[in-house]
Amino acid sequence: MEMEINKNKLIAGAAIAALVLGGGGLMLGRTVFAPTAATAPVANEAAEGKEAGHVEGLVEMDAKRAEAAGIVTEVTQSGTLGAEILAQGVVAAAPDGEAVLTARADGAVVRITKRLGDYVGQGESIATLESRDASTISADRSAAAARVALARSTFAREKRLFEARVTARQDFEGAQAALAEAEAELRRTQSAASAARVSGDGRTLAVVSLVSGRITKADAKLGAYVSAGTELFRVTDPRKIQVNASVLPADARRVQPGDRAVIELLGGETVGATVRSATPSVDSETKAATIVLVPDGVAQLTPGQGLRVRITPRGAVAGTSISLPEEAVQSVEGRNVVFVRTAKGFQATNVTIGQRGGGRIEVVAGLEPGQSVATRGAFLLKAELGKGEAEH
């Protein structure tokens, strides 16, 4: 009997143990694979916050990082691709922005105070010539001054005698005329000396800059003998430049002063410009007319630099299309996309494109004038977008 009781106890204990182990296994499974009531809200909030902070199609990038990556933007403007006039241009100095400095007389270069690339102010001396012509000009000036002194003395004496009724009016008027001639000769010799930049001692001539700027050409050699009219230096004011664009005669007739234009620089950067004038005739060799543009900024332009310009005649601005460089439009999952600059970075925006030509592409829908769009480096944004979408 006792053995039967113990057997029943063992069976009951095994059943209880099995129940406890099963419950423990269930508890363990819940602990590992399912969050508890205390931890579930935290995990859910984190997941929801991550999803809420993600904006589809946005590449987060501040201005400093975009500049370091070489991304260039362009502000969109209305105008169809056919309305723009594409032309090649050359940066040139404005008529009042460059001075050619020549020798005013024959002589030897005895002093050079400035070198190629140096800045000079208007009226500043750059070199000095020793010239026999300087002595001649100085002597003429001195002789004219002496004749004026004599004529003034003679005129004063004749005036006193005439007023005292000692001499005739004819003698007084003759002295007056002689004084006027002597003074005229003195002004001539003084002007000649000033134009030649003759020194006070009358031995040397100074080569003086007519504008403020930098020396862009320096042909003068110390000790060299030069003839009158020989070019010695060239000074250019970098603040006074223009762009000369060559266009077809038919296009030139569409352009008017005041029309806006865009100057395209290497690397995709652009500078705004305004049409100043157009030549009334075409070049006999190139058969093209020249449009003179005044750039809005000159920091990145250098005389002699070649570039491309886009001129938009005012009569052709009407329309809703927008012209952009071809590299601004990227293909993302079969869609044409441009990256519009936002406060947080660049937003991928679907667009509808039209015709292409001259490295430009026409956007007929999806953009508004005045938006800033990535041009150079847009493919980098496409790569960043693909990386970000894969992570999400």
Image (cartoon, rainbow, N blue to C red):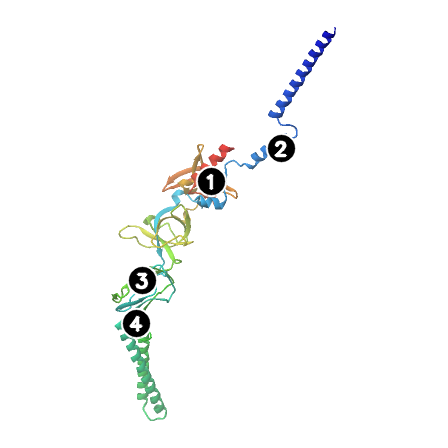
Which numbered disc flags the more N-terminal residue, 2 or 1? 2
Of label 4 and label 1, which has the lower sequence position? 4
Q: Tag 1: residue type?
A: Phe
3D distance between C-alphas at marks 4 and 3: 18 Å
**Circles 4, 1 touching at the beta carbon (< 8 Å):** no
Tell us which disc is closer to us: 2 or 4: 2
Label 4 sits on a secondary structure element that is: strand
Q: Is residue 89 left or right of residue 330?
A: left
Kindly report which numbered mark, 4 or 1, lies closer to the viewer in this rendering: 4
Q: Which mark is residue 42?
A: 2
As measured in the structure, the alpha-carbon distance from the residue carrying label 4 to the one carrying label 1 is 65 Å
- Is residue 351 among what the camera can see? no
Q: Which residue is mark 4?
A: 204
User: Label 4 neighbourhood size at 10 Å, few (<14), some (14-19), many (20+)?
Assistant: many
| Tag 3 near tag 1, CB within 8 Å | no
At 65% from the left and 18% from the top, the residue drawn is 21
Residue at x 67% of width, y 13% of height: 14
Q: Nearer the viewer, residue 277 or 64?
A: 64
Question: Residue 360 appears at what percent x and percent y?
Answer: 39, 42
Q: CA distance from mark 3 to mark 1?
A: 49 Å
Res. 279 image quadrant: bottom left
Pointer 2: residues within 10 angstroms few (<14), some, or many (20+)?
Answer: few
| Residue 167, picture quadrant | bottom left
Three-letter amino acid code at disc 4?
A: Thr
Q: Earlier in the sequence, mark 3 or mark 2?
A: 2
Residue behind mark 1: 339
Amino acid found under the numbered disc labelled 3: Phe
